[in-house]
Amino acid sequence: MAYAIFKTGGKQYRVAQGELVEVEKIQGEVGSVQRFDALLVSDGSGIKVAGDLKGAAVEAEVVSQFKGVKVLAYKYKRRKGYHRTVGHRRQLTRLKITSIPA
């Protein structure tokens, strides 16, 4: 099974062709194609790392821009009557991997 590893938003993702992956928000319209430098590529018989790839890139199509699930944080100090609830929703982008380098 062929797969590749690429980095975006400070995180690394292992993907295969045709997979859907959710990453930190990237600029791009729905339907546009994004390119990411491949850090590692495996074709099933061997592995190539970044030094051997020389500009190989993973291509992905932007499927949607959306907000993730709400994350709640609760602050509390005992016996002081202090409590706060704060939360946020991450901005995410869903990508469909269209091609990985060979």
Image (cartoon, rainbow, N blue to C red):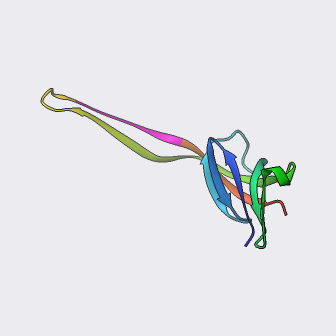
Q: In which quarter of the image is residue 4?
A: bottom right
Q: Is residue 92 left or right of residue 57?
A: left
Q: In which quarter of the image is residue 59?
A: bottom right
Q: Is residue 10 left or right of residue 42?
A: left
- Which residue is rendered at x = 35% and y = 39% of the image? 73
Res 14 visible: yes
Q: Which of 46 and 97 is in front in this view?
A: 46
- Which residue is rendered at x = 86% and y = 48% of the image? 55
Q: Which of 14 and 75 is in front in this view?
A: 14
Q: Which of 21 and 15 is in front in this view?
A: 15
Query: Which residue lies most toward the right here?
Result: 54
Res 32 visible: no
For residue 95, above or below residue 29: below
Q: In this view, does 97 lie to the left or right of 85?
A: right
Question: Can you give x and y, in whole percent of width and height, for residue 46 in the image?
Answer: 78, 68
* Range shown magenta: 83-90
- Which residue is rendered at x = 52% and y = 41% of the image? 90
Question: Can you give x and y, in whole percent of width and height, for residue 18 in the image?
Answer: 72, 66
